[in-house]
Amino acid sequence: MKLSFHLLKYELLFALANKGILLSTSFFIILILIVGIGFGQIGESSEKTLLAIIWIAISLSSLLSIKTMFQEDFDDGTLDLYILSNTSIETIIFIKSIVHWITTNLPIITLIPLISFPLGITIYHSILICFVMLLSTPALSFISTIGAALTLGEKGGNLLISIFILPTFLPIIIFGMKISLLITNSTYDIMAHLILFALSLICIAITPFITSLIIKIHYT
Amino acid sequence: MIKFRKNIWEFANPNNFLSIANKIIPFFLILTIITLSLGLVWGLFFTPEDYRQGSSVKIIFIHVPTAFLAINIYFMMLLASIIWLIRRHHVSLIAAKSAALIGLIMTLSAVLTGAIWGKPIWGTYWAWDPRLTSFAILLMFYLGYLSIWQTMKFSDKIGDLSSWLCIVGSIFALLSRYAVFFWDQGLHQGPSLSLDKEENIDNVFYFPLIICIIGFVLLFLTLLLIRIKTEIQKRKINILLNARDG
């Protein structure tokens, strides 16, 4: 337990020192602006497209730094020590996913009211959308660890990760987009909210075990 | 003559598999040609035209079997991957690997024939209808599974990774399918075939359709056996080459 807290602190400090937060938020802002400008040229800019862009941008930016999550530890042998240590590898994966979520998705979610307010979504609705994202985006970080584990030790694995992992974001993205659209229309589908949060919780509960099984393949 | 065997896992020995496959591939080939030509000729030339859809209804004899196979080949890959993870039979892994490309082609042909059918009936080649979307999702997971085999060299490790990818992919494909169906049931008609007779299509189309489905399943089995045989022989050649060089 002590080791877990120590690891959490270490990983967070490491991510902060690497300017991970700055990079992910700037990627998100640039993506939103580029797609927004592109839609502006066609003249199709509405709050519907904005919601779609936000969800796609958040799913793309949660894949950003995923490759380095296990790769550096795998290369310098830290992962071997983690596997040999008392702490189970599942706990380490859990902590790493949480840190990944805190450093990439959380800053982006706090930005969303700032971005969506000038573009036509009311503050109240955008805060509700933020709340939905807060509960559903941890699943994205947790699922993408599977991709990081699958391409461990593979050169140029970034493209492969997107090919493997982007389709698996679909349930979250479909539910998230539809719920956000309903929120902007001031209708609340409680059933859909519950299913989305259940999906997120199931992903958080199960993916560390799957990821640990996949990582152990590399050590047999 | 095939000897009596104690249990089914003895077929998983590549040499046993090869000797049996060599014997049954010609039979399967002949059966496929007979059933497919019977079903397609009956379906395309000797069925009446639908009173609403005209002759465009006849594409059902290709569309339904390919769609049926596209989904079931993924299940077959899932089963083969699980068998590989539990019992470590290489033939099972190779079967999953070989089935993927056939599944991708079946998905593509189901989508294409659906598009050709959709233009006169719905007025559009493609719509973001739940059933069509779930085929797009299936296509993505086939591409993901194939890309792991395309980029990495054949080894037991990659076999494990691809099996896990298949398992994870099928979980999320199923979840996405239900997510897509959550709000509306869409433009596409219900299933053409079901076990309770209430919703089935008319008998005039039903019997040739069943023959077509059997024909396509036989086609899949024949192609699969040939591909597994090729893959096993390819691996044997590689082993021999490695032994000669090193």
Image (cartoon, rainbow, N blue to C red):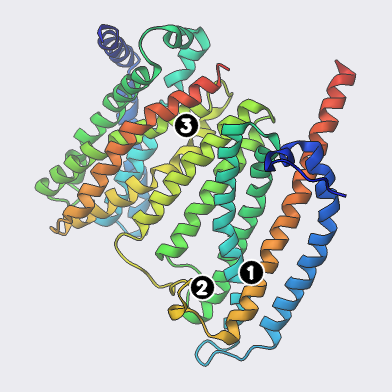
Q: Is residue B141 left or right of residue A104?
A: right
Q: Nearer the viewer, residue A137 or A115?
A: A137
Which residue is tagged 2? B193
Chain of the residue under the numbered disc 2 shown in the image: B
Secondary structure of the residue carrying numbered label 2: loop
Q: CA distance from mark 2 to mark 1?
A: 11 Å
Residue B229 in view = yes
Foreground disc of the pair 3, 1: 1
Secondary structure of the residue carrying numbered label 1: helix
Identity of the residue drawn at 40% across and 73% down: B187
What amino acid is found at the position of numbered circle 1 in the picture? Answer: Ile
Q: Vertical placement of B132 versus A202: above or below? A: below
Mark seen at residue A147 = 3
Identity of the residue drawn at 23% across and 40% down: A133
Chain of the residue under the numbered disc 1 shown in the image: B
Residue A5 at x, y percent in the picture:
25, 11
Identity of the residue drawn at 33% across and 12% down: A14
Residue A13 at x, y percent in the picture:
28, 11
What amino acid is found at the position of numbered circle 3 in the picture? Answer: Gly
What amino acid is found at the position of numbered circle 2 in the picture? Answer: Leu
Which residue is tagged 1? B213
Q: CA distance from mark 2 to mark 3?
A: 37 Å
Q: Earlier in the sequence, mark 2 or mark 1?
A: 2
